[in-house]
Amino acid sequence: MLKIKHTAAWTVLSLLIMLVFTGCASIEKAEGLHRQGEKQEALEMAISLLEDDSAKVRLRAVKLVGKIGGPKAGPALHQRLAEEDARVHREVVRNLGRLKYEPAIEDLADLVPEASADLVRALADAFRDYGKSGIDIVVSRYDSPSQSSSRAAYKDLMIAIGPEIADSISKLLKGRSFYDNRDTFDILRRIKNPRVATLMIPYLADEEVAEQVIEAMKQLGSNAVEATITALQIQKKSGELLVTERLIRILGLLKAKSGIDMLEGFSQHDSERIRNAVEQSLFQIRGF
């Protein structure tokens, strides 16, 4: 009896080993076909291996499907969002973003509330690749009353996405008090990237949100200085007084010593309002 059990166990193990080697051989063949330029045949084979018993094979298949792309790639990976292996799952998520497969966006957003730290990073990569079409959905989820219990999770994802969210998130500032927007400003502050300031500056022309943008720029600290100075250089030519005044105020709030020369260049401006703003900002920077 013991010998029979031993034989049966060895048979099962042998079958498993054979299946693993078969899967590896198949994915290697698919990768070889891709290198040879046989993309369609390679794609078909890679898609068939997305359900292989080996997680390693599935991982390589996901990467290959994402690399080849095409009309069949997105739908095939979308069907694998229920993947059980965490590493393979993250690769599915990333490649859906790389392919910009829009039918998957809502399903990806659904993953956020229960996402691990590793999956959040993968989702951030995906939504960054989707661009505005995907990021707008994340922002909408973050702002939706029906998603209030998951607001912190969407906030964490937006911070992980980075400065790319600035344009989409700016629309949330309109018609709300600074208190209502405190989480939104916290997101912008925590991104700590000069690009956020560059993306925020155009909103200084919007009377409805200008004061809140000024506050957000202040919270960005040194990350906002260079973008503000550059914008002021542009204003010398365009002459939009309100925007110019707001940029001057920002340099004062930032106590930006590197902006002193730029401010002094506006000290003889025709507008008394601009001259007053310059005087106030120089006082804030110098302390006298």
Image (spheres, helix red, strand yellow):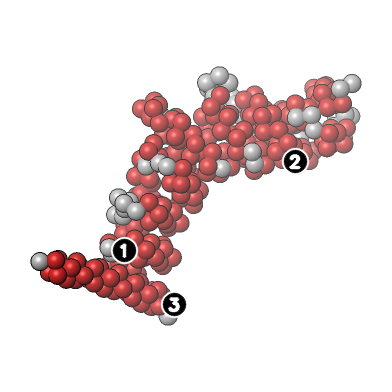
Which label is found at residue 35?
A: 3
Tag 2's secondary structure?
A: helix
Pick the front one: 257 or 236: 257
Tag 1's secondary structure?
A: loop
Disc number lying in front (2 or 3): 3
Q: Which residue is mark 1?
A: 54
Residue 85 image offset from top left, x and y in percent: 34, 53
Residue 19: which quarter of the image? bottom left
Residue drawn at 38 percent across, 56 percent down: 88
Give above or below for 89 relative to 239: below
Q: CA distance from mark 2 to mark 3?
A: 45 Å
Decide which of tag 3 and tag 1 comes sooner along the chain. 3
Give above or below for 171 relative to 175: below
Disc number lying in front (1 or 2): 1
Amino acid at dot 2: Glu
Residue 278, visible in the rendered structure:
no
Residue 74: which quarter of the image? bottom left
Amino acid at dot 1: Ser
Tag 3's secondary structure?
A: helix
Residue drawn at 44 percent across, 77 percent down: 35
